[in-house]
Amino acid sequence: EVQLVESGGGLVQPGGSLRLSCEASGFTFSSYWMHWVRQAPGKGLVWVSRINSEGSSTTYADSVKGRFTISRDNAKNMLYLQMNSLRAEDTAVYYCARGQQGGYYYYWGQGTLVTVSS
Amino acid sequence: EIVLTQSPGTLSLSPGERATLSCRASQSVSSSYLAWYQQKPGQAPRLLIYGASSRATGIPDRFSGSGSGTDFTLTISRLEPEDFAVYYCQQYGGSPPLTFGGGTKVEIK
């Protein structure tokens, strides 16, 4: 059974940093592109970032470029999102998702809430 | 960036009725790389349709997707009580960013 389990969310002050993790199981992690998608409270879904299966290519939404870094450890079946210089508008539930054929998502994690507030 | 506009914002229907949800793209979606998701409160989204018209594994056949280019439709032929939720379209063709529509809420009338 495919499972994606996020962790690392919490309350952080504006300008602070947080590192999200996503533990994958039930599939060959190193064969899939992985993505982060976020959802602000009461709002819609927004794509954040993606990383290729080897970890050698990354892409970001303009809103997080230069502040967030996506990475992966295929030996540990782990996906990460390092978030720096956090802003109030980064407050959201962050989902990791397994990419399929360019970027639709059969499998999602349960999400982890990040709250940026003083 | 391809902007997806979903309409209507809210659809009020009764169980057993037909639901027709629209997703319009600001430019052509390559290779019909258009997906639909269902999301219920407190849950992660669930994939319904990919490639504009292919049903995901385990999705009932009352859900169907159609369209190409810039106009896409999700149809629920007969609403079941568990179908009342928010629905999102997503395009994943071409260059990033991947984008989602703003969502259509299907509520019980």
Image: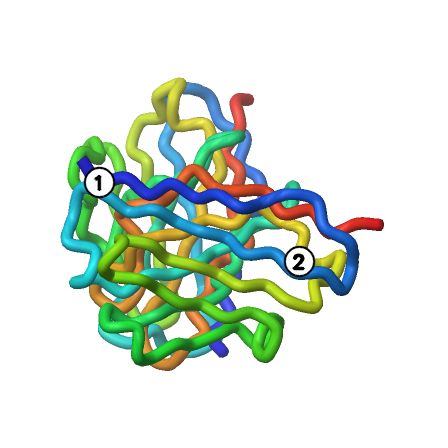
Q: CA distance from mark 2 to mark 1?
A: 28 Å
Q: Is residue A32 left or right of residue A10?
A: left
Which x, y percent locates residue A11? 70, 44
Q: Is residue A77 visible to the viewer in this orientation of the structure?
A: yes
Which x, y percent locates residue B63? 26, 38
Q: Is residue A91 left or right of residue A73?
A: right
- Kindly state the secondary structure of the residue where label 2 is placed: helix
Residue where numbered disc 2 is placed: A90
Q: Compared to B83, does A80 lie above or below?
A: below
Chain under disc 1:
A
Q: Compared to A80, does B107 lie above or below?
A: above
Using the image as rendered, state which of residue A32 and residue B104 is in the foreground: A32
Which x, y percent locates residue B8? 54, 47
Q: Is residue B51 visible to the viewer in this orientation of the structure?
A: no
N-terminal label among 2 and 1: 1
Q: Is residue A34 left or right of residue A86?
A: left
Residue ID at (59%, 79%): A66
Residue where numbered disc 1 is placed: A2
Label 2 environment density (alpha carbons within 10 Å; few <14, some 14–19, many ≥20): many
Chain under disc 2:
A
Quadrant for the N terminus of chain A in the image: top left
Residue ID at (59%, 42%): A113
Which x, y percent locates residue B14? 46, 21
Under mark 2, the amino acid is Asp
Under mark 1, the amino acid is Val
Using the image as rendered, state which of residue B49 and residue B12 is in the foreground: B49
Label 1 environment density (alpha carbons within 10 Å; few <14, some 14–19, many ≥20): some
Residue ID at (24%, 72%): A54
**Do marks 2 and 1 share a subunit?**
yes
Cβ atoms under marks 2 and 1 closer than 8 Å = no
- Kindly state the secondary structure of the residue where label 1 is placed: loop
Residue B52 placement: quadrant: bottom left
